[in-house]
């Protein structure tokens, strides 16, 4: 994941900003504050990207990956719509507790830019529904240059999302979060329709650390800078913020680990899981091969 990559990460202040003032208000809406659902994983499951992860002889990469992690951020669906049979195969490959978080097609977000996309959206959702109960939360990632001037398209899209499937949206143009009038309207729209506001933590785009939750779900896409020590310290700081949110009423955490160059995303995810278990008393399994190799 090259988004937000910088030449010298050491010059970046990675401190997590304070919460948006309305985030605590959203978390107070939780009806079951003790019911905490956690999914932590990577973005891909292939051997080429997940180095130092698969033991020798592994043929079914998804089967092995899903034996170690409880979810996957499914980026492959961004590039093309897979047929129902493929989603069905993925469904039968993974364990009962595994969840997929597929990205909606780029035709919707990047090519048509939310204009006249209802038919394509319906096809995306219909095919993804073949994941049945293993479908977590699909998400929409807008292009960097999709600006607030097209806010009306966002309104139409959100109001048309009437499927019985929760949705998350990631906006990347700085205007969505750093123009007070725009952000206020956006947050109100997402809250009203139960749409989760995606948080992206990456080196070169600290302006997107809005720290504004619009539901009692935190959907976080975290991007390591390939700096082993600082990457782990950054993850440790996130543990503290998540603990605070959980105490305030956070119900669900979806946390996905990327890197600018995918060298040790599984190891970083395992580090995060280990720390999360110790801090919050969660019981997520730590990927066994990473434990044996001592990569964190």
Image (cartoon, rainbow, N blue to C red):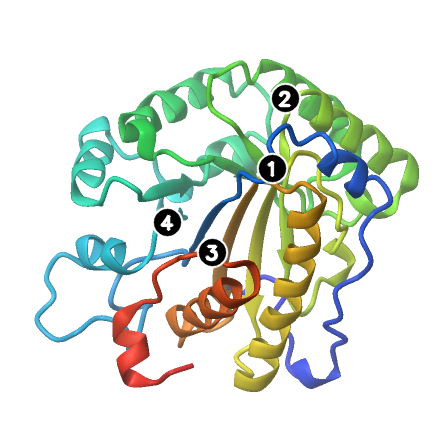
Observer-side mark, 4 or 1, equals: 4
Q: Nearer the viewer, residue 263 or 277?
A: 277
* Label whose residue precedes the other's in the sequence (1 or 3): 1
**Residue hosting label 2:** 158
Percent position (x, y) of residue 153?
A: 68, 23
Alpha carbons under labels 1 and 2: distance apart: 10 Å
Secondary structure under tag 2 reads helix
Q: Nearer the viewer, residue 101 or 261?
A: 101
Task: Give neighbour class at mark 1: few <14, some 14-19, many 20+ (Cα, 10 Å).
Answer: many
Secondary structure under tag 4 reads strand
Alpha carbons under labels 4 and 1: distance apart: 18 Å
Residue drawn at the location 74% of the way across and 34% of the way down? 28
Observer-side mark, 3 or 2, equals: 3
Compared to residue 125, the image places residue 260 above or below, namely below
Residue drawn at the location 63% of the way across and 21% of the way down? 158
**Residue hosting label 4:** 71
Alpha carbons under labels 3 and 4: distance apart: 15 Å
Percent position (x, y) of residue 4?
A: 63, 65
Alpha carbons under labels 3 and 2: distance apart: 33 Å
Observer-side mark, 1 or 3, equals: 3
* Label whose residue precedes the other's in the sequence (4 or 2): 4
Circles 4 and 2 in contact, beta carbons < 8 Å: no
**Residue hosting label 3:** 282
Percent position (x, y) of residue 121?
A: 46, 22
Q: Could you say which disc has been placed on residue 143 in the image?
A: none
* Label whose residue precedes the other's in the sequence (3 or 2): 2
Q: Could you say which disc has been placed on residue 169 in the image?
A: 1
State how many labels appear: 4
Task: Give neighbour class at mark 2: few <14, some 14-19, many 20+ (Cα, 10 Å).
Answer: some
Quarter of the figure with residue 217: top right
């Amino acid at each position: 994941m090259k988004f937000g990559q910088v030449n010298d990460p050491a010059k970046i202040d990675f401190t997590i900003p304070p919460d948006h003032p309305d985030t605590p208000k959203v978390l107070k809406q939780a009806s079951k504050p003790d019911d905490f659902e956690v999914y932590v994983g990577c973005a891909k499951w292939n051997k080429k990207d997940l180095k130092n992860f698969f033991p020798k002889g592994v043929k079914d990469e998804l089967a092995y990956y899903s034996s170690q992690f409880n979810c996957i951020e499914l980026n492959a669906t961004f590039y093309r719509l897979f047929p129902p049979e493929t989603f069905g195969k993925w469904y039968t490959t993974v364990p009962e507790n595994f969840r997929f978080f597929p990205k909606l097609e780029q035709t919707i977000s990047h090519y048509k830019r939310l204009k006249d996309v209802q038919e394509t959206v319906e096809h995306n959702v219909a095919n993804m529904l073949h994941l049945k109960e293993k479908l977590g939360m699909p998400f929409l990632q807008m292009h960097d240059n999709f600006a607030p001037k097209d806010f009306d398209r966002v309104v139409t899209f959100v109001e048309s999302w009437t499927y019985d499937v929760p949705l998350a949206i990631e906006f990347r143009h700085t205007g969505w979060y750093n123009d007070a009038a725009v952000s206020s309207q956006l947050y109100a729209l997402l809250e009203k329709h139960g749409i989760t506001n995606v948080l992206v933590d990456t080196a070169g785009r600290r302006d997107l650390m809005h720290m504004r939750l619009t539901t009692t779900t935190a959907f976080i896409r975290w991007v390591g800078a390939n700096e082993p020590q600082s990457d782990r310290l950054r993850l440790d700081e996130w543990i503290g913020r998540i603990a605070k949110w959980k105490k305030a009423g956070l119900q669900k955490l979806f946390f996905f680990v990327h890197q600018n160059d995918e060298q040790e995303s599984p190891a970083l995810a395992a580090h995060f899981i280990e720390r999360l278990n110790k801090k919050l008393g969660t019981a997520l399994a730590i990927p066994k091969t990473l434990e044996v190799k001592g990569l964190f």
